[in-house]
């Protein structure tokens, strides 16, 4: 509930700040007709953006699009799963997320959240299976790719981890953690090759 309140408070704040003072100053940005078109535009903007903070804001808009399930029931189960995760009740979270992916298998964020819970439980095989579902639905999901990279690194597959982080940077070039991981893994792999 706190997350939902924070989201609406932030939305209200941004909408209040962005309103122009006079009606004649209003210029409406083109509104994409579909979620897919909005995401395409956001990803294009994310790839071009060279300011880290601006890129983070664009990434935040992408996450907001991903979180929209279009179903009040799914949204409620996602909230319940998040609360269970915060309380480290991972089995309870998985129960809710199993329902989410069963009821709406085309909702990539349900799969991504379940992959995250499996990762937290160190169920890497199940996490990777869910990541695969996410990437089939949304190949540009930099969150899922980051999770894949972390699993590869934790299981000692440095080259695969490096490749996954490089894929992240191909989508989100200003992601600082991905930049740092690429640099670190590149150095480690170069050192191992000597």
Image: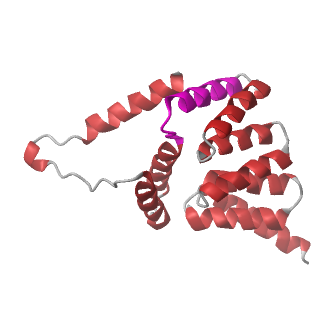
Magenta region:
67-86
- For the image, the number of numbered tags is 0
Residue 191 position by quadrant: bottom right
Q: In this orientation, does residue 177 appear? A: no
Observer-nearest residue: 57 or 137?
Answer: 137
Instruction: Tell me: residue 153, above or below residue 110.
Output: below
Q: In this orientation, does residue 165 appear? A: yes
Looking at the image, which residue is at 74% across and 48% down?
A: 130
Q: Is residue 161 magenta?
A: no
Residue 106: horizontal and vertical position, in percent?
Answer: 59, 48
Model colouring:
secondary structure
Instruction: Tell me: residue 29, above or below residue 20.
Output: below
Residue 39: horizontal and vertical position, in percent?
Answer: 46, 56
Observer-nearest residue: 78 or 2?
Answer: 78
Residue 193: horizontal and vertical position, in percent?
Answer: 90, 76
Looking at the image, which residue is at 27% across and 56% down?
A: 30
Looking at the image, which residue is at 72% across and 51% down?
A: 131
Magenta stretch prevailing secondary structure = helix
Residue 15: horizontal and vertical position, in percent?
Answer: 30, 37
Q: Is residue 99 left or right of residue 170?
A: right
Looking at the image, which residue is at 67% across and 38% down?
A: 102
Q: Residue furthest front?
A: 103
Quadrant where the image shows the C terminus:
bottom right
């Amino acid at each position: 509930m706190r997350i939902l309140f924070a989201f609406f408070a932030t939305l209200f704040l941004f909408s209040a700040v962005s309103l122009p003072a006079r009606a004649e100053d209003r210029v409406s940005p083109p509104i994409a007709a579909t979620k897919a078109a909005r995401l395409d535009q956001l990803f294009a903007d994310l790839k071009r953006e060279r300011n880290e903070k601006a890129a983070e804001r664009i990434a935040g808009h992408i996450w907001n699009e991903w979180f929209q399930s279009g179903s009040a029931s799914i949204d409620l189960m996602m909230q319940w799963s998040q609360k269970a995760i915060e309380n480290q009740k991972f089995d309870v979270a998985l129960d809710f997320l199993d329902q989410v992916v069963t009821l709406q298998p085309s909702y990539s964020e349900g799969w991504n959240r379940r992959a995250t819970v499996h990762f937290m439980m160190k169920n890497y095989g199940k996490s990777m299976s869910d990541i695969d579902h996410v990437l089939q639905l949304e190949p540009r999901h930099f969150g899922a790719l980051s999770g894949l990279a972390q699993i590869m690194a934790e299981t000692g597959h440095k080259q695969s981890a490096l490749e996954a982080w490089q894929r992240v940077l191909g989508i989100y070039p200003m992601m600082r953690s991905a930049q740092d991981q690429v640099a670190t893994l590149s150095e480690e792999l170069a050192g191992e090759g000597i």
